Image (spheres, helix red, strand yellow):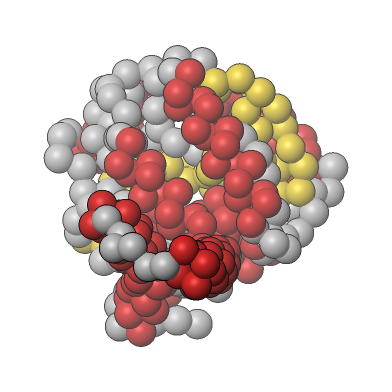
Amino acid sequence: MPDTMPLARTAATTDAPAPALSVVVPCYNEQEVLPEFHRRLAAVMNATGLAWEVVYVNDGSRDATLAGMLALQAADPHVALVNLSRNFGKEIALTAGLDHCRATDAVIAIDADLQDPPEVIPELIAAWREGFDIAYAQRSARHGESWLKRSTAHAFYRLMQRVGGRVQLPKDTGDFRLMSRRSLDALLQLREQHRFMKGLFAWVGFPAKAVLYERAPRAAGTTKWNWWKLWNLSLEGITSFTVGPLKAATYLGILVAIIAAIYLVVLLARTVLFGNPVAGYPSLMATMLFLGGVQMMMLGIIGEYLGRIFNETKGRPLYIVERYVRGG
């Protein structure tokens, strides 16, 4: 097992029995919504009749999120918390929570903003009891989001389905899902630095079932995903699961070379038939700038993949835990 795993497990040393279900909740600046989220989550989980825990992961929040988690942990024995040493990003925070969950049967990943309602969890459990290892919540509607965001999300999922090859990313599906223990153990073997969790969930395979739900508006606070972060997440997903951009750069280079060869033939024919008048500088500059732009774009694509190789070879742990407070 990679070196990051012992770091994630060091605090789990008590003899309390492991729960059947774990709920993993990564949080960054969620002080406004955390109490209401936990109230609704606890009501749903208590109604299942199964032993459960919730693992809150504080991803370097700058507000009172950690204090809120500590208050919940003191009041409810079901609550465990992982406090990361700094902000590592949601994908890493989710991984940290999955590393620390103690569930013997299944784990549920969900965000704290209540856009993914905890009340959908019983439907995920029902699908799991049917024999599916993974039950993923698929959005049938996205309330409270702009037309532009819905459209770009729609386009991204369809693009990933086309370029993903053998790994088929379910459309309109986020991190909200239930995973059996064996599928979780398979997922935890994947320790790459550049983590696109939606793709990793799909990569491990296992029988899966979609559970449709309507995504609600954020209950409180502000979204942490601006357009720049969403763009970078999209790049992460594409470059993590396909070499399509490299192939596209190759095909573009071939196309430009063919166009240049055709243009050269045309110039030679014009020179032979009509002489060789001096060409204007505007067309020459336009051609040079176009080719220079194509070359820079290709170098940028290669650089994206090279940077990922560089980060992987350093072998750093995915995250550092400042403290782990276990429930029960």
Across and down, in percent, residue 42 comes to 49, 28
Residue 149: percent from left, percent from top: 45, 27
Relative height, residue 258 to residue 197 (above, below):
below
x%, y% of residue 38? 41, 28
How many marks on residues? Answer: 0
200 displayed left or right of 14: right
* Viewer-side residue, 38 vs 196: 196
Q: Residue at x 30, y 35 (%)?
A: 226
Q: Up-down: is 168 above or below 75? A: below
Q: Quadrant of residue 316?
A: bottom left
Q: Is residue 20 left or right of residue 25?
A: right
Please report the residue visible at 67 percent of the width from the left and 49 percent of the height from the top: 161
Of 327 and 65, the residue lying toward us: 65
Q: Give the residue at x 21% y 49%.
A: 60
Q: Is residue 253 left or right of residue 209?
A: left
- The residue positioned 76% from the left and 59% from the top of the image is 206
